[in-house]
Structure formats: C-alpha cells, structure tokens
Image: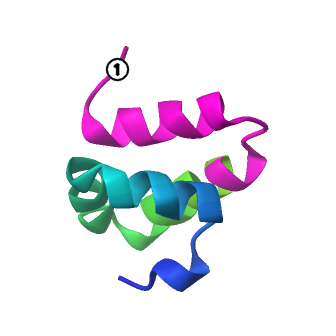
Amino acid sequence: MDMNNLPIGFALGMSMHGDALDAYSKLTEAEKERVLNECRDAKSKAEMDRIIDRLSGNWL
C-alpha cells in the first residue's frame, strides 16, 4: 500500500493501528476512496481517530 498518498493524520493513525491498516487494505477501491474523502474532510484529530477506530472495529 502506498502510504505517500494518504492524508498525514490518517497515515500516522494507521501506522499505530495494524488492525485498521489490515481492514483498509481489504476494502474495494471505491470504499477506500470514500474513507479517504472522509479523512480529507475531518476537522480534528478526534474525527480522524473515529475513522480509524471504525476501521479497527472499535465503534465506541
């Protein structure tokens, strides 16, 4: 996976959550694009953390 094209906050968060990275790698290209658009729209670290948690299966 090319981490160079990911939003920086997403790439950093994913590097710390292997389960989220694994889940992201299994998404279709369309699903990945939706996640990336959501990341680009995130206005805070908390929003980015929620996206990563959702990928991790942690729906807190």
Residue 33 appears in which quarter of the rendering? bottom right
In this image, 41 relative to 2: left or right? right
Give the quarter of the image for residue 36: bottom right
Q: Is residue 54 magenta?
A: yes
Outermost residue toward the top in this view = 60
Q: Is residue 24 left or right of residue 47?
A: left
The residue identified by callout 1 is 59
Q: How many marks?
A: 1
Quadrant in which the C terminus appears: top left
Image coordinates for residue 57, horizontal then vertical, percent: 25, 32
- Secondary structure at badge 1 equals loop
Give the quarter of the figure containing the N terminus.
bottom left
Residue 16 lies in the magenta-colored region: no
Image location (x, y in percent) of residue 49: 51, 35
Q: Residue at x 62, y 64 (%)?
A: 8
| Picture residue at 59% right of the left edge, 80% below the top | 5
Tell me residue 2's x, y (percent): 43, 85
Dot 1, crowdedness within 10 Å: few (<14), some or many (≥20)?
few
Which span of residues is magenta-colored? 39-60
Amino acid type at mark 1: Trp
Which residue occupies the foreground of this view, 46 or 36?
Answer: 46
- In this picture the colour scheme is rainbow
The relative height of residue 27 versus residue 51 in the rendered view (above or below) is below
Magenta stretch, overall SS: helix
The residue drawn where x is 34% and y is 52% is 16
Q: Which quadrant would residue 48 be assigned to in this image?
A: top right
